[in-house]
């Protein structure tokens, strides 16, 4: 037998398959790494506890509805990513509800670290207001929470700030 024997044609075909599977394996491992190291999948803080308290949340909503208050929320855009928020609370008889502490929570749904909570000042019978310049233009979730009367009264609105 001669030492210079030539290889058969196509001897390298199995290596093509092995190389292709190695590429697929490397891509899958890379995707698995990024899937586990970036987004945790949790979009709510303490979701289990909030789920357990859901019946209480429904009961609070029923009580809030039973108050039969008329609530008017006005959001006016202003310069420098500003928003002027005015909210008026009226009881079932149509009288303004005074003596409450009203807080506004501004939450940026797409970016963490820009949230802020402010207190609205009373400006008239049952009317409370604030003017806020927010750090970013765009969509914000506004939660208004009034405390000091029968039960806490909350309202959620999605606003757009120029």
Image (cartoon, rainbow, N blue to C red):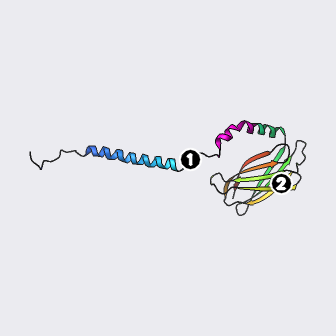
Direction left: furthest residue: 1
Residue drawn at x 32%, y 47% as measured from the top left: 19
Residue drawn at x 34%, y 46% as measured from the top left: 20
Report the residue marked by disc 1: 40
Report the residue marked by disc 2: 128
Is residue 84 or residue 20 the one in the foreground? 20
In-image side of 30 versus 110 (left or right): left
In-image side of 104 versus 89 (left or right): left
* The magenta stretch spans residue 60: no
- Magenta range is 44-58
- Secondary structure that dominates the magenta span: helix
Q: How many marks?
A: 2
Query: How far from the left and from the top, in percent, is residue 49?
Result: 67, 41
Of the image marks 1 and 2, the number of the one nearer the N terminus: 1
Q: Which quadrant would residue 44 be assigned to in this image?
A: top right
Distance between mark 1 and mark 2 Cα atoms: 39 Å
Q: Nearer the viewer, mark 1 or mark 2?
A: 1
């Amino acid at each position: 037998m001669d030492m210079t024997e030539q290889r058969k044609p196509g001897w390298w075909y199995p290596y093509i398959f092995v190389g292709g599977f190695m590429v697929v394996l490397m891509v899958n491992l890379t995707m698995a790494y990024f899937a586990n190291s970036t987004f945790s999948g949790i979009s709510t803080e303490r979701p289990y506890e909030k789920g357990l308290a859901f019946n209480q949340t429904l009961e609070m909503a029923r009580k809030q509805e039973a108050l039969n208050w008329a609530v008017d929320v006005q959001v006016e855009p202003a310069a420098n990513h500003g928003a002027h928020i005015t909210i008026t609370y009226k009881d079932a008889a149509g009288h303004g509800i005074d003596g409450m502490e009203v807080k506004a929570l501004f939450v940026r749904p797409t970016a963490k670290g820009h949230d802020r909570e402010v207190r609205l000042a009373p400006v008239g019978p049952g009317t409370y207001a604030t003017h806020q310049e927010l750090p970013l233009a765009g969509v914000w979730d506004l939660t208004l929470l009034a405390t000091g009367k029968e039960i806490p009264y909350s309202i959620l609105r999605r606003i757009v700030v120029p």
